Amino acid sequence: MGVFAAFAVVGFAAAYIGPTGAAIAEANADDATISLYASSIDDIQTRAVDAEAVAEAPVLEREGYTVYVKPKPKPKPAPVAASTGGSSGWSPPFVTPDPGSAQAIAYDMVKARGWGDDEFACLVALWNKESGWRVNAYNASSGAYGIPQSLPGSKMGSAGADWETNPATQITWGLGYIGGRYGTPCGAWGHSQSVGWY
């Protein structure tokens, strides 16, 4: 068995040293610093670069072509709800009226006509401007009277004999006038805002 082991060692050594071993031994004999790694680096492709050519950037020409950039579309304005609040587009805000006040009476009448809180807000703004909601408001230059500033005040007699002192009578007449002439309180408010009267 010992003889067989000796032959095996010699065979392996001969196979290892063969052509590869001879190449390594030959390379080591020429230059002691070259290794298999160093010799494989020589296989890398290289490119010679002219320093002057790199310094000059190539000029690119369009050769008659033009570049068109599509403009961004202008944003569409947000749709604005139809405003009945006048030429300025402002509509007065809704405020709950004080119980027992002329405005509270008017609020109930506005709701009974099927108009919403927005219409009541327009009515409040309109009659604030006209009379300050005073039953006895009188305009000496025109002769207009009462909360709705009826001209003449005696027109409100069609709503009741107590038209001079009763806010409910004045409001009833005023809402009838507004409904017949402008359709809604916001319609009357819009007219008042644009021309100064309703």
Image (tube, helix red, strand yellow):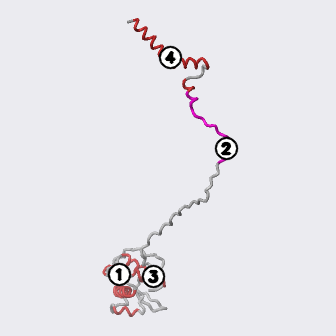
Which residue of the protein is positioned furthest toward the top in this rendering?
A: 2
Residue 73 painted magenta: no
- Residue 107, given in percent of the width and then of the height, sits at 34, 79
The residue that mark 1 highlights is 106
Q: Which residues are magenta?
A: 40-57
Contact? badges 2 and 4 (CB < 8 Å): no
Rate crowding at label 1 as few (under 14), some (14 to 19) or many (20 or more) other CA atoms within 10 Å.
Answer: many
Instruction: Check disc 2 and report the residue beneath it.
Output: 53
As drawn, the residue found furthest toward the left would be: 112
Sequence-first tag of 3 and 2: 2
Front tag of 4 and 1: 4
Q: In the rendered image, which residue does mark 3 sit on?
A: 129
Residue nearest the observer in this picture, 187 or 173: 187
Judging by the rendered image, the residue that carries numbered circle 4 is: 18
Amino acid type shown at disc 1: Ala
- Above or below residue 90? Residue 29 is above
Which residue is at the front of the view, 196 or 63? 63
Residue at 67%, 44% (x, y): give it. Answer: 55
- The quadrant of the picture occupied by the N terminus is top left
